[in-house]
Image (cartoon, rainbow, N blue to C red):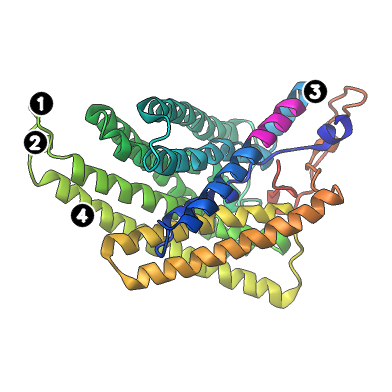
Amino acid sequence: MHPVSKRYSQELSTGTGSISLLFHAFPYGNETQPFIIFTLIFFFLNLTLFILFCAITTARYIMFPDIWGLMIRHPAQSLFTGTFPMGACTLLNIAVSLISEKYRLGGKSFLYAMWGLWWLDVAISILCCWGMVHIMETSQKHSLQSMTAVWLLPVVTLIVASSTGGVLSSVLQEYDPGYALFTQVASVFLVSIGLSLALMLLTIYIQRLIIIGVPQGVNVLSVFLPLGPTGQAGYSILLAGQFFKEALPLQHGGSALMNDASTGNILCVICVCASFVLWALASMWMVFALLAVCDELRKTRIPFKVNSWGLIFPNGVYANLTIALGSTFDSPFFRIWGAIYAVFTLLLWSFVAINTVQVVYNRSIFEAPCLQELNLTEGSTDRKECSSPHGVPTSIFQ
């Protein structure tokens, strides 16, 4: 394990988790036994990968502790730390919405355990967001030319955590309405901050694309990343509206706003409208991404790199939001388009997974940019310049 650990760098893929969510939310036949089985297959596959990668990453930093400081100072590698709490959220979503709510496995104790894990995930997400943005401001060198959509990863953690809070609050409502309301309010707080920061960064990113141009080669795939914060924020806000419609008005307290019979419906309408606007924004970025990829394919072949896993989660959450809007509006358009896009995302996952098996076999997956800066054999920490184009890591497992 020593030579592998020396070169191993992790970015935990959330793609497999998004596929399990799509099987669970699919608008046609999702209650049938085959869909439930596939949901659980991808859930347990995701759980296995999550535990495996956590173990490998822990071993890596125990055996080579100097790598942590090197990674956290790297302007691109460090941003992938946010994928850890995002990956955990995909597990919590299925654990709550299917295992707990549908099958009642573990009862109230299991649900409260998932709730406690969610709060831990929220703490890690907050640390990733505020901590990494602060490090970007004070300890790293960034420029408009080197900017990619990877800048979004630390702030998306809050958005993803907020959507899981929305899933939890609807189930908690049955056991403790007070805890459920507190969870949903915290989720709205998280998505407000995460979405605000994401929109600020997306403004800079569109400026970068216009002035500098679209990233070249395999890095062009990063143009799909904006679907993540826009799609997931829309889903989180949609869940918030559904919760407030069911939970309000309150039957206690002296707040005229919270005790008004119309408050829940008004908040629900506002949230649905905001969710639709974010879906439209995500659709815009999807078109931009497809145009960028087509333009690059006309020039050259895009080589496969393991960072192609970054395609799965953004496209998955866009499909999930589309399906959720189809249910909200009872719209055949959204249901059909969501189903088509979900199938496309599954095919994309299959393509990336098959190619990943091949690079695991030839060991080219075990690469990390700028580890040449650290002579692990001699224990020195000589720094060298990294030549990763556009500041994007060459491996998704960073």
Amino acid type, label 2? Asn
Q: Main secondary structure of the magenta part?
A: helix
Residue range corresponding to the magenta coloring: 51-60
10 Å neighbourhood of mark 2: few (<14), some, or many (≥20)? Answer: some
Dots 3, 4 in contact, CB < 8 A: no
Q: Tell me the SS state at disc 2.
A: helix
Whole-Å distance between the Cαs marked 2 and 1? 8 Å
Mark 1 sits on what residue? 253
**First in sequence: mark 3 vs mark 4:** 3
Amino acid type, label 1? Gly
Q: Is residue 146 above or below residue 224?
A: above
Dots 4, 2 in contact, CB < 8 A: no
Mark 2 sits on what residue? 259
**First in sequence: mark 1 vs mark 3:** 3
Horizontal and vertical percent for residue 259? 9, 36
Q: Tell me the SS state at disc 3.
A: helix
Dots 2, 1 in contact, CB < 8 A: yes
Amino acid type, label 4? Val
Q: Is residue 280 above or below residue 105?
A: below
| Residue in front for this viewpoint, 398 or 333 | 333
Whether residue 259 sits left or right of residue 50 in the image: it is left
**First in sequence: mark 1 vs mark 4:** 1
The residue at the point 69 percent across, 48 percent down is 391
10 Å neighbourhood of mark 4: few (<14), some, or many (≥20)? Answer: some
Mark 4 sits on what residue? 269
Whole-Å distance between the Cαs marked 4 and 2? 18 Å
Residue 364 visible in this rendered orientation of the protein:
no
Q: Which mark is residue 63?
A: 3
Asked if residue 227 is among those painted magenta in the image, a careful observer would answer: no
